[in-house]
Amino acid sequence: MIEFENAAVDVPPFGRMLLYSDGAVEVGDPAVKIYAQDDFDAFIREAGPSDALIDRTLERARALRGGG
């Protein structure tokens, strides 16, 4: 059984919460580099709040795995 912890988070009106899987984080070419959580955190901080964040995240994943 996998242990997990419950938590509560207050999201203010018009605030945003980004939910993602490890597929958004652990991307890249295994022969070169697999990016990790720290890399993804930096990407999100640099991206800032944006209506296009989902599109930018998908573009990043495709680019890092060599798919454009």
Image (spheres, rainbow, N blue to C red):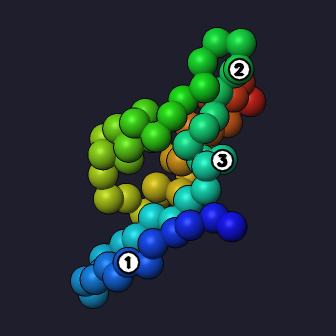
Q: Disc 2 vs disc 1: Cβ atoms closer than 8 Å?
A: no
Looking at the image, is mark 3 or mark 1 nearer the viewer? 1
Q: Is residue 55 left or right of residue 42?
A: right
The residue indicated by pointer 3 is: 23
What percent of the width, then of the height, locates residue 68? Answer: 69, 29
The residue at the point 45 percent across, 64 percent down is 18
Q: CA distance from mark 3 to mark 1?
A: 23 Å
The residue at the point 61 percent across, 49 percent down is 22
The residue indicated by pointer 2 is: 30
The residue at the point 63 percent across, 34 percent down is 27
Q: CA distance from mark 3 to mark 2?
A: 14 Å
Label 2: how many Cα within 10 Å (few below 14, some 14–19, many 20+): few
Kindly identify which numbered label has been placed on residue 62.
none
What percent of the width, then of the height, locates residue 54? Answer: 53, 57
What percent of the width, then of the height, locates residue 67? Answer: 74, 30
Q: CA distance from mark 2 to mark 1?
A: 33 Å
In the rendered image, the vertical position of residue 3 relative to residue 8, given as above or below? above
Closer to the camera, 44 or 51?
Answer: 44
Q: Which quadrant would residue 66 be assigned to in this image?
A: top right
Residue type at mark 1?
A: Ala
Judged from this view, the residue extending furthest toward the bottom is 13
Dot 2: element: loop
Which circle's residue, 3 or 2, is located before the other in the chain? 3
What percent of the width, then of the height, locates residue 3? Answer: 56, 67
Residue type at mark 2?
A: Pro
The residue indicated by pointer 1 is: 7
Residue type at mark 3?
A: Gly
